[in-house]
Amino acid sequence: MHVAIVAGELSGDLLGAGLIAALRAQDPQLRFTGVGGPAMLAQGFQTLVPMERLAVMGLVEVLRHLPDLLALRRQLYRQFIADPPLAFIGIDAPDFNLGLERRLRAHGIPTVHYVSPSVWAWRPWRVRKIARAVDLMLTLFPFEAAFYQDHGVPVRAVGHPLADAIPLRSDPMAARRALGLPGPDEAPVVALLPGSRWGEVSRLGPLLLDTAVWLSARRPELRFVLPAATPRLYEVLAGMQAERAPALPLTLAQGQSRAAMAAADVVLLASGTATLEAMLLKRPMVVAYRVAPVTAWLARRLVRISHFALPNLLAGRELVPEFIQDAATVANLGPAVLRWLDQPLTRDRLTAEFDALHRELRRDASRQAAEAIMELLRPRSGGA
């Protein structure tokens, strides 16, 4: 008895690992195959192809890899039809997984999609495609579940595993010690997180370093910490620092992004899951994002939301400043960081807002997701 899972990137790999552990707690006999990364492999998952083949971002960027992605999807389809799983679970990667889910569902294989695509933000007509592709949608956020209920798609809001994993109270002093940073009374710390993919880092790394130089010129007491997501990106960022900010008081760390955020007084970062993590750590943040110009042109015509940072989406209003594309400049980012440093009462109010959102998302997500999947399968297996 096996369950097929396809995770598209590292964040999906972490979700998949938690889900595998929770499903195995429901049924120890289950095996898991498909596409996954190191966290899923540590749970005994058998990956059929390297996960890196799916980790492509942006509309234009995907086009360059489209032939390989389509070939991979055909390969997985043939394999799962030849050896049908109890269920197929696509984790994120909607443009890849939904097409695979639709075809497998047509063959009677139950399909689950874990992590809603942003149909509530852009291309809302995709909900019709989703309705044809999935027997169950698992969402991380409550506002997403409401959208699917309105469109008649079976859905369960399970909360976010990060909200379960991150304590309601973090320990900044322990994080500073782990990174070799001075204590809170000695120097304020700004964390720089330009993203975990090469494309993000190439566009945002120079901008964040230039902003740090701007901040350091005005606040010489500031210290900076920059975690690199991979060894390759560590080398890239070290080269960027040597070129653009050789005198900057900066600690370049290998990994340890959560510690870097926990240690910081303010986080300057790329939009994405890291903004949720910073929110759960109750850290003030300034959010920036840049994509390929053609991707930005298309997004301006298709996106229907006024905010893109997760804390703002969850709150339904702007809690933290966000700057995208041409607005992502040193002239905007630097003063926004200084405002957080200079306004302790505003920081306290933000912490209270973040705490309320954290509690709302803290639902034991992996267990909830596993229970919803087992409920879906029970009628098919003749269980009670």
Image: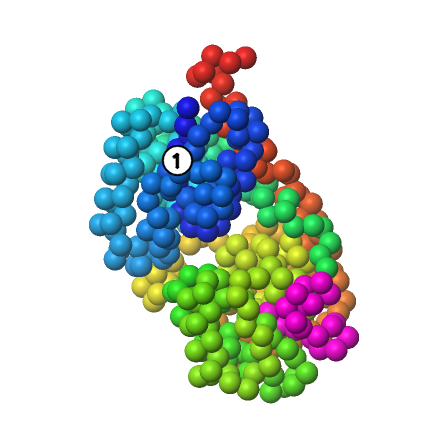
Q: Residues within 10 Å of mark 1 (few under 14, many from 20)?
A: many
Relative to residue 60, is residue 240 drawn left or right?
right
Residue on which disc 1 sits: 33
Residue 380 falls in image quadrant: top left
Nearest the eye: 167 or 48: 48
Residue at coordinates 23% horizontally, 44% vertically from top-left? 71
Q: Point out residue 148 in the picture as x, y percentages from the top left corner.
A: 48, 35
Name which residue type carries label 1: Thr
Give the left or right position of residue 83, taking residue 139 as reference.
left
Q: Position of residue 167 (x, y in %)?
A: 69, 50
Task: Examine the structure image and report whether residue 177 is included in the region drawn in magenta.
Answer: yes
Query: Which quadrant would the N terminus be assigned to in this image?
Result: top left
Give the left or right position of residue 203, taking residue 182 as reference. Answer: left
Which of the pair 13/335 is nearer the observer?
Answer: 13
Specify the segment rendered in magenta: 173-191
Q: Relative to 185, does residue 55 appear above or below in the rendering?
A: above
Q: x, y percentage for residue 150?
A: 50, 33
**Looking at the image, which is closer to me, 214 or 370?**
370
Left or right: residue 65 compared with residue 312 = left
Q: Residue at x 43, y 33 (%)?
A: 32
In the rendered image, the vertical position of residue 267 relative to residue 187, given as above or below:
above
Residue at the spot 55% in from the left edge and 69% down from the top edge:
253
The residue under the point 54% across, 35% down is 21
In reply to whether residue 126 is colored magenta, the answer given is no
Of the pair 90 and 241, the residue shown nearer to us? 241
